[in-house]
Image (cartoon, rainbow, N blue to C red):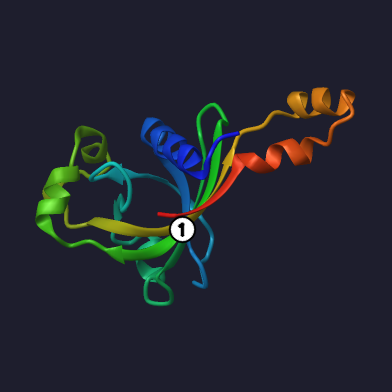
Amino acid sequence: MPTDTEIESLFWKELKSAPFVMLGLVGARDGHTQPMTAQFDGESGPLYFFLAKDNSLIAGLNESDRAIAAYASKGHDVFAAIHGRLAQETDPAVIDRLWNPHVEAWFEGGRNDPKLALLRLDTERAELWKGGSSFGAAITRLFGADPKESYKDNVAEVAL
């Protein structure tokens, strides 16, 4: 049985390996989520996202700063619902630290593109699920056990 700390550690490892989330603002009129690539400035949060200033997430900050990011790791080993506060990051030193060729490909004007914006997600908490297979659940049931009972130890609620 993994501990909450082990599940959280696996989450950060997997997120760094495949840093793609569906990010949205809770309570904003255009409250849909959209695919974003997370950038890191350390071993864990906050998470950063480069985007264009005309993106609906920027406009939505006038209505809400409460964010949710949904995550599924590449091999479906970890799933997460990440909650926190979203804000625009304007510190040029942070932008310089996170800037890389993958980001540059999205901005014609490079680092000085007038459309460039950076959002910071100050992570607060997350629900994390360690992947479980339907096949494994079926085998467990064949032996007379309840797969939900054995799976409950693969779920963690953590403060980020």
The answer to whether residue 1 is left or right of residue 144 is left
Residue that label 1 marks: 125
| Label 1 SS | strand
| Residue in the foreground of this view, choosing between 15 and 30 | 15
Q: Residue at x 47, y 37 (%)?
A: 6
Name the residue located 45 percent from the left edge and 63 percent from the top edge. 67
Q: Residue 66: x percent and y percent?
A: 44, 68
Q: Could you tell me residue 140's position as x and y percent?
A: 81, 26
Tell me if residue 110 can be seen: no
Q: Image quadrant of residue 99?
A: top left
The image quarter containing residue 118 is: bottom left
Look at the picture and state if 32 lies above or below 105.
below
Q: Quadrant of residue 57?
A: bottom left
State whether residue 99 is above or below residue 122: above
Quarter of the image with the C terminus is: bottom left
Residue 23 seen:
yes
Q: Quadrant of the N terminus?
A: top right
Q: Is residue 120 left or right of residue 112?
A: right
| Residue found at x 41% / y 70% | 60
Nearer to the camera, 61 or 16:
16
Percent from the top left, x then y, of residue 28? 49, 72
Residue occupying the far bottom of the picture: 63
Question: Identity of the amino acid at label 1?
Answer: Arg
Q: Is residue 81 above or below residue 27?
A: above
